[in-house]
Image: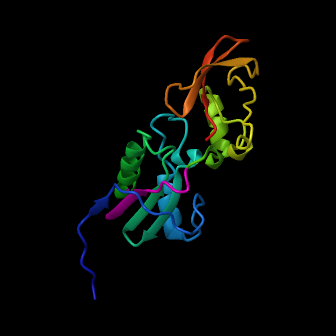
Amino acid sequence: MAREASPRREVVSGVTAPTPAATGVRPSDEASARVWDLAATILDPEVPALTIEDLGVLREAHADGKRAHVVLTPTYSGCPAIDQMRDDVASALREAGYDDVEVSYTLAPAWTTDWMTEAGKRKLEDYGIAPPQARSDAIRGPIPVTLGVKCPRCHSLHTREVAKFGSTSCKALYQCQKCLEPFDYFKIH
């Protein structure tokens, strides 16, 4: 029996509950892996040198025929870029032929810079942004200690924080005391 084509449907909002399955890992089944790979091409609108996969925002991808579902975790609950990421993922999936597209968010577990890929951290540095230089669990404890931030241009550790917030709230503004260049530092979360 031939199945009737369903009208195109798109859900692009909402917060989902976290799933017990591991997230942030490319699915092993071919159909879901294709959805992941399409979503993984989307660039971060605030740092266009990074994909959402590099950033660690892409958490899950699922496919069932012409239905695709992607779960994103914003870098923080008020992240203004997440809506653009959602729209870009939905558009890429629709362009790839998926009729029923859902892109949702999850806030738990909270995003951490530990989810950034090593390739993403290298891309940040090449782009002129100092990547996070420790794991988030390294700064938790009775006395959090911030070590020197390496300049992405000359690689000097002789830098100073100019402002707690840089071009976006997930970055701080630093200046290198050696080459005198200002730069953003992607803060550890």
Q: Position of residue 155 (x, y in %)?
A: 74, 23
- Tell which residue pokes out farthest to the bottom in this image: 1
**Magenta segment includes 151:** no
Chain part drawn in magenta:
96-110
- Tell which residue pokes out farthest to the front in this image: 142
Q: Is residue 63 left or right of residue 114?
A: left
Residue displayed at 57% across by 66% down: 27
Q: Is residue 3 visible?
A: yes
**Magenta segment includes 107:** yes
Residue displayed at 68% across by 25% down: 152
- Tag count: 0
Quadrant in which the N terminus is drawn: bottom left
Q: Position of residue 39 (x, y in %)?
A: 47, 53
Q: Nearer the viewer, residue 43 or 178?
A: 178
Q: Is residue 97 visible?
A: no
Q: Position of residue 46 (x, y in %)?
A: 47, 34
Q: Is residue 108 left or right of residue 7?
A: right
Question: For residue 21, which quarter of the picture?
Answer: bottom right
Residue 70, relative to residue 1: is it above or below? above
Quadrant in which the C terminus is drawn: top right
